[in-house]
Amino acid sequence: MQVLACLAALAYLGFTARPPSALRSLLKTASVAFLALAALLQGAPIWLVVGLALCALGDFCLSRDGETAFMGGVGAFALGHLAYVVLFLGHFSSELGQIWEMPGLVLACAFAVLGAMMVYVLAPRAGELKIPVLLYIPIILAMGLAAVSLTSPALLWVLPAALAFMTSDVILAFETFVLPEDHPMRRITPYLVWPLYWGAQAGFYLSFS
């Protein structure tokens, strides 16, 4: 399953900037759905399986056109982030107090600044999607803070994966709401978002499976 997930993720990289198609949706969805199935078969924590499955659903929705599909994707990813929050905080090594001590405090402050900047930049540009976008921001930050609380050396890759997930969300938000259609950065943003995002899912899978 892991091999199939990797192959689908690599294959999708060639489709990430292409228009919607059945094959594009299949590759994008399968790249994380196979990770969810592998986690389930290995008896991994149920919240890992749920988080991966919700992200796979979000991938399918965002691979299609239209506002309804976009909103479905936002909702699925929001729930996926929350599933990861439960997964991280439910781990035996989670210590919330670590968030308020160095170096966790530095990251917590950085997340707060990031959240404020996203609200400032995205709120005037999100139009009718303003409320969902603003609700999504604290959910992203909560996932990052939950990752900061983990202390087990075995979960070394969780925090980098969470930071990669957050970074992919930020880039995608700026691509969707800030960058003009003809902006040259749009040629490279899809190739930044996908490795960061899928790498994050793979990092969570490897850490908890």
Image: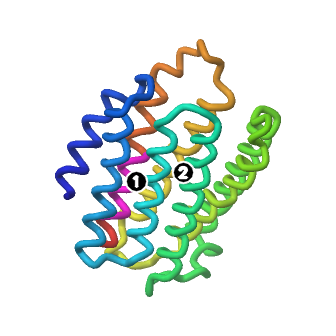
Tell me the quadrant of the picture where the C terminus can be found.
bottom left
Numbered badge on residue 143 = none
Looking at the image, the residue that sits furthest to the left is 3
Residue interval drawn in magenta: 197-205
Figure quadrant of residue 178? top right
Q: Position of residue 133 (x, y in %)?
A: 71, 47
Q: Position of residue 125 (x, y in %)?
A: 77, 32
Which sits earlier in the primary sequence, circle 1 or circle 2?
2
Residue ID for mark 1? 200
- The residue sitting at 38% across, 56% down in the picture is 201
Figure quadrant of residue 12? top left
Circle count: 2
Q: Between residues 87 and 39, which one lies in front from this camera angle? A: 39
Q: Position of residue 135 (x, y in %)?
A: 73, 55
209 relative to 6, above or below: below
Tell me the quadrant of the picture where the N terminus can be found.
bottom left
Residue ID for mark 2? 166
Element on which disc 1 rests: helix
